[in-house]
Amino acid sequence: MKNVSKPLRIHDNLAGQKVLSVSVGLVSWQITCRVLVYCLTLSLLIIAMSFWAMLQGDYHLSPLQVLQAFYGEGNRLGIYFVTEVRAPRIIAALIVGAALGISGAIFQGISGNSLGSPDIIGFTNGAATGALITIILGNATPLEIAVGAVLGGFGTSLAVWFLTRHTGLRGFRLVLIGLGLGATLSAVNSLLVVRASLTQAQTAASWLAGSLNTMNWNKIIFLAVFFTVLVPFLLLLARPLDILNYGDNVASGLGVNVSTIRVLALFVGVILVSLATSVTGPLAFVALSAPHIAQKIAKKRTLFAAGLTGSTLVLGSDLIGQYAFNMTLQVGVVTGALGGLYLIYLIATERKK
């Protein structure tokens, strides 16, 4: 009798972890049970926070009214707040958080450094520089701001690639070069704001704080379209980036073109962080902390787990900023405060190692 492989089975991998294997025709997929439980838990938490956020605000709604609003039933004011105000804000938080979390996991994977995130290396500041130039030069549309952010991020990535071309996109040299570029670009951003007119400076300062206040369905569609376009590249990079965690020699021995994967991952990560920054402004430390939290709890760095963690952090930070204090705080202020504390913790733990 022929051995028929089971489409769904649980077994131990080489590291002794329980792994769920799914096989459908010629396509197979594996995920550790710990990562699966972690992702399912975060998904349930996101659903709970999203539904709770639908109920809150100056115009309070009951759970039944929220459900009716999704079907176009109930009073017009309730439908408006659910479908035009709260839902776009929540969805934007989830997509932006996922983009930042995945971008952080990519950069930490290719650099092999726990501090190798877009915030530290300077790509976030580069994207902000490009977006600020479009804001200050004129009344830029969201698309023009997005294009400016992507160009700024790409310009920064080219500078980083040029300065690390002899040593490669890895190690502390990448982090140090990125820190220098980030500090320079931060000074440029401050100069742009100072030299702008009062109206432009106010707009730029509000954008730099990082906010979800102006979300609408046009921005959601813009984010969703570009994020969907990047999904095939993320699927292509997932396994090679996972193998890179074991070192360049092991990755090369397993058939991974290390240099090509690093360059491709660099540009995909830049696009993700630039798109997220163009819509909300810079949200500090999400890209740094999300992959670390996912790896610490799930015991494995994966793009999907990092993305879910980023979504949870951004949505949770937005809810804290809106409802935890007597004043309303922008989501970027909350992520910056929480992320700064996490950075201190991370540096302290790294020193002990």
Image (cartoon, rainbow, N blue to C red):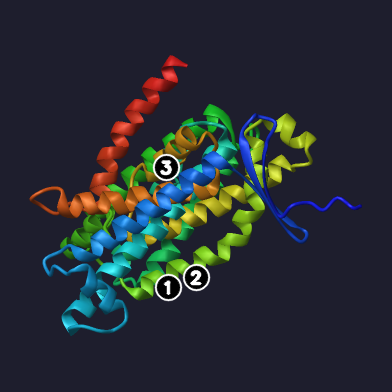
* Distance between mark 1 and mark 2 Cα atoms: 6 Å
How crowded pointer 1 is (Cα within 10 Å; few <14, some 14-19, many 20+) is rated as few
- Residue lying furthest left: 326
Residue 52, percent across and down?
25, 59
Where residue 158 sits: x, y (%)? 56, 48
Which one is earlier in the sequence, the residue at label 3 or at label 2? 2
Residue 140 in view of the camera: yes
| Residue 220 position by quadrant | bottom left
Kind of residue at badge 2: Val
Q: Position of residue 161 (x, y in %)?
A: 58, 43
Q: Marks 3 and 2, how far apart in space?
A: 23 Å
Circle on res. 290 = 3
Q: Nearer the viewer, residue 107 or 65?
A: 65
Instruction: Residue at the far right: name it.
Output: 1
Q: Check disc 1 and report its element: helix, strand or loop.
A: helix
Report the residue at 22% width, 55% height from top.
205
Q: Nearer the viewer, residue 293 or 331?
A: 293
Q: Is residue 39 above or below residue 18?
A: below
Residue contact at pointers 1 and 2, CB within 8 angstroms: yes
Q: CA distance from mark 3 to mark 1?
A: 24 Å
Return the residue found at the far front.
1
Residue 221: give its label: 1
Mark 2 crowd level (few <14, some 14–19, many ≥20, 10 Å Cα): few
The residue under label 2 is: 225
Q: Earlier in the sequence, mark 3 or mark 1?
A: 1
Total numbered labels placed on residues in the image: 3
What type is the residue that disc 3 sits on? Answer: Ala
Which residue is painted at 72% across and 36% down in the image?
251
Q: Report if the CB atoms under discs 3 and 2 are less than 8 Å apart.
A: no
